[in-house]
Image: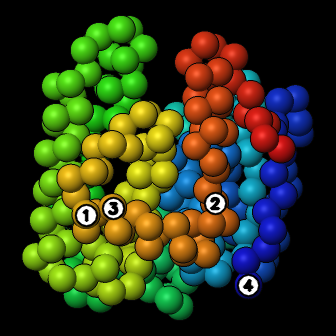
Amino acid sequence: KTSSPKCFIITVYPAPGPVPKDQVRLYSMRFCPFAQRTRLVLHAKGIKFETINIHLKQKPDWFLEKNPDGLVPVIETPAGEVVNESVITSVFLDEVYPEKKLLPATPFGKAQQKMMLEHFSKVCLFKISSARRKGDDVSGLEAELKEKFTSLNEYLVKRKTKFFGGDTITFIDYMMWPFFERLGMFEVQHCLDHTPELKKWTELMLEDPAVKATMHSTENHKTFYNNFLDGKPDFDYGL
């Protein structure tokens, strides 16, 4: 059973003690889409965990010792194992906790999902946001995004499945979801209008308990993101 993670921002705070034996610890940030990937996996698999949210503008020295890059997510186990990066932590959790596997069983199935993730990683959401903020024309970038969405829509049509790995949610769905959750924040939700199967996928994802447990409203995403871009992020926003 998944615990209700305690969430607090670390500024001047002593290093946490050892991870309790019956759970893992997630170092996160509430609005980070990459950390959300790991949270989705933790919730979907029912792994007991606690959360420590890191103030990414005031990172404590002890956190930088765990991950010199200073990025989240980071997973720490009771054995003192430290794993970072969103996809790597998610794969790690799926392998260490074999109940309710999210990755396919076959090497080819795993390869298919990794190829799709590589393709999806080239989506230009942050470029669109940056260009719009500068007052630049974003029509070309939006056309590129629509092309990516068309490709994803065609994949679902060809497979005749509800989700990208079949008729149940799998690893690839959780890896892509955080960015679809933020389409409203980036003001590009209209780019889904021409992709009915992909739009249906987003609606189905919103019904998932793990998605419900980790998501924020578009309004909260927008407020945090705008404050972040203005150099005044409120990592506790909405609490």
Numbered mark located on residue 199 in the image: 3
The three-letter amino acid code for the residue at tag 3 is Lys
Q: Alpha carbon of mark 3 to alpha carbon of mark 1: how far?
A: 5 Å
Among the two numbered marks 1 and 4 on one chain, the one whose residue lies closer to the N terminus: 4
Q: Which mark is residue 56?
A: none
Q: x, y percentage for residue 220?
A: 66, 39
Label 3 with label 1: CB-CB less than 8 Å: yes
Question: What residue is pinned by disc 1?
Answer: 196
Q: Residue at x 63, y 60 (%)?
A: 214
Label 1 secondary element: helix
**Does residue 20 appear anywhere in the picture?**
yes
> Which residue, given by chain and number where applicable, does mark 4 sit on?
1
Mark 2 and mark 3 in contact (Cβ < 8 Å)?
A: no
Point out the frontmost of discs 4 and 2.
2
Tell me the mark number nearer the camera, choosing from 3 and 2: 3
Q: Amino acid at mark 2?
A: Thr
N-terminal of the pair, mark 3 or mark 2, is 3
Along the polypeptide, which appears first: circle 4 or circle 3? 4
